[in-house]
Image (cartoon, grey):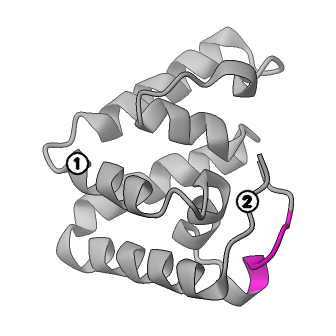
Amino acid sequence: MTKLSSLDELYDAKAAIEQLKATEPKLHEKFVHVVSLTRQLQIQYHYMGCLLMDDDPCNHTPTYVKSSVLELYHAEIERLKQDSDFAYVQQLLINHQKVGYPKISLLVLGAKPEKIKGSTIIK
């Protein structure tokens, strides 16, 4: 689903990501790893977000990725979720759910809020 985000919401999400980086650098690094892996495997960010939040990924489940690769991906997701401070990532996603998993993911990867504002279609 495409989400329209205000620039202020994107800046707030970016600030929360920077706060996570400052207070929990190892957790932030793991989060960046999972988001980057999601991008490299061309898996939808919404699918990643659903897995992180224990939501049903329904129609976002990748069909073109080999099951062995998907198993490795799920293992990396679980490694992040097993971190004792993972609740910080979940809270960040909850607090900024209006922004959406795809745009939060782009912010995690270093995108500028101005570049992703609006109704850009990112899954």
Q: Residue at point 80% right, 17% down?
A: 63
Q: Which residue is mark 1?
A: 87
x and y percent of residue 73 in the render?
54, 28
Tell me which label, 2 or 1, sits earlier in the chain.
2
Name of the residue lying farthest toward the top? 67
Q: Residue at point 40% right, 53% down?
A: 94
The N terminus: image quadrant:
top right
x and y percent of residue 12 in the render?
46, 82
Which region of the structure is painted magenta? 115-120
**In the image, is residue 23 above or below residue 101?**
below
Tell which of 67 and 5 is nearer to you: 5
Q: Which residue is mark 2?
A: 3
Q: Residue at point 58% right, 72% down?
A: 107
111 is within the stretch colored magenta: no
In the picture, measured across the screen, residue 53 lies left or right of residue 121, that is left
x and y percent of residue 13 in the render?
47, 74
Q: Amino acid at mark 2?
A: Lys
Give SS at disc 1. Answer: helix
Q: Which disc, if any, is residue 119?
A: none
**In the image, is residue 32 above or below residue 46?**
below
In the picture, measured across the screen, residue 111 lies left or right of residue 83, that is right
In the picture, measured across the screen, residue 36 lies left or right of residue 16, that is right
